[in-house]
Image (spheres, grey):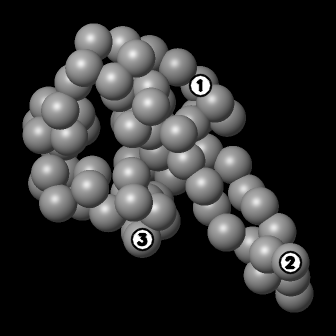
Amino acid sequence: MKDIQVKNNVKVRRIEIGNLTQGDIAKLIGVTRQTMNLIEAQKYNPTIKVCLLIAAALDTSIEKLFWMEEEV
């Protein structure tokens, strides 16, 4: 199996739509600010449920926030 990394664009989108903080989004979706920090730093792969909640909170599609990249 190929080594795949999940990448995200959460921080960029969060700032684009109104300069929301990690804490703001965390509160909206029911996770901690630390969890949001780890997701944005790409050190934690959230569940599909959390990905969908983030996408809804940021008024965008999950495909625009999260994608896979093959390691070379």
Going 77% across and 61% down the picture, which residue do you hit?
A: 69
* Badge 2 element: loop
Residue carrying label 3: 43
Whichever of labels 3 and 2 marks the residue nearer the N terminus, that label is: 3
Q: Position of residue 64 (x, y in %)?
A: 64, 30
Query: Can you say whether 1 is above or below 56 in the image?
Result: below
Q: Earlier in the sequence, mark 1 or mark 2?
A: 1
Circles 1 and 2, Cβ within 8 Å, touching? The answer is: no
Q: Is residue 26 above or below residue 31?
A: above
The residue type indicated by label 2 comes to Val
Q: Nearer the viewer, mark 1 or mark 2?
A: 2
Asked which secondary structure carries label 3, the reply is loop
* Picture layout, residue 51 above or below residue 70: above
- Marks 3 and 2 sit apart, C-alpha to C-alpha, by 19 Å
Query: Which residue is tagged 1?
Result: 61
Check disc 2: other Cα within 10 Å, few if <14, some if 14-19, many if 20+.
Answer: few
User: Do tag 1 and tag 3 residues touch (Cβ < 8 Å)?
Assistant: no
